[in-house]
Amino acid sequence: MNNEQVIRLPFWETIKRSFIYSFTNFDTIIKISSVWFLLLIVEASLGFPYLCTISSEGCVGTGGQKISLMLMTLAVFPVSVAFCRRTILRQEFNMFYISFGARELKYIGYTILLILAIILPSVAAIFATALLMKGLDIPTYSYYFLLLYFIIFAIYTSRLTLALPAIAVNNNNVSFKESYALTKGNANRIFWSTAVLAIPGYLCLYIVALLVSFLGDTMDTFAAKLILTFLVYVISFIDI
């Protein structure tokens, strides 16, 4: 019989403290991400393609959007690592702080593994479902099943995420295996709390998208697009 004690994370208390920490350390978040705002120069030269991620109004070519998404994705990882180091180690940061070395690359690698741990089983499950449901109108229902499988495997995989902050603070003792053991009984709490914490960011992006659509041609100026892209950057960096 397994008598190992399971420690349940306080769901709402965790969410409350996370929001409070972000608000009280807003200046630190800006300092951590400040250097990456230089990507606005690239955005301006490409015609502000990052706005296409929130609204299709006046979008530029897909090539520029791919470059923009790639650069922004690369920027989010070092910001996430620095935020973890600030939270756990209380490390202080100055403006235009930048770090992109072995630690950040390892963080990226582990994140990719986590994503694959969700995508690959989900794809395999949807194919299995299609075989079992042969004769039904699979194309109509497959997207719903795929979303369901994504959520199921994302919940399961959430128990591995403790390895990411461990990487950020150079703690090699917490691997995926240790993370899975330490988070026993908390898969749903970790996944759904993460989802709740992401809601304000998505709402802000949605509001910006509505603003772009509502104002229409009024926003079709360099200054307006620069301001909107800056706002989207701020939201993206805070919502990590």
Image: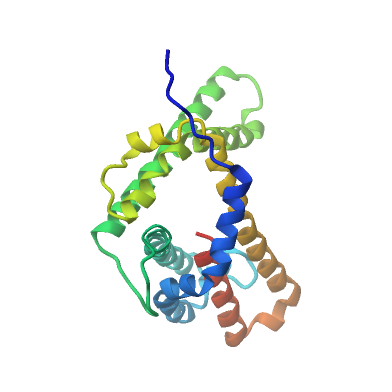
Q: Position of residue 63 (x, y in %)?
A: 45, 66
Q: Position of residue 204 (x, y in %)?
A: 65, 65
Q: Residue at x 54, y 40 (%)?
A: 9
Q: Position of residue 105 (x, y in %)?
A: 29, 56
Q: Nearer the viewer, residue 233 or 97?
A: 97
Q: Position of residue 180 (x, y in %)?
A: 40, 34
Q: Nearer the viewer, residue 211 or 4?
A: 4
Residue 60 at least partly seen:
no
Quadrant for the N terminus in the image: top left
218, above or below 22, in the image: below
Q: Nearer the viewer, residue 99 or 126?
A: 99
Q: Is residue 103 left or right of residue 151?
A: left
Q: Is residue 137 left or right of residue 77?
A: right
Q: Is residue 186 left or right of residue 76?
A: right
- In which quadrant of the rendered view does residue 147 lie? top right
Residue at the farthest top position: 1
Residue 29 at least partly seen:
yes
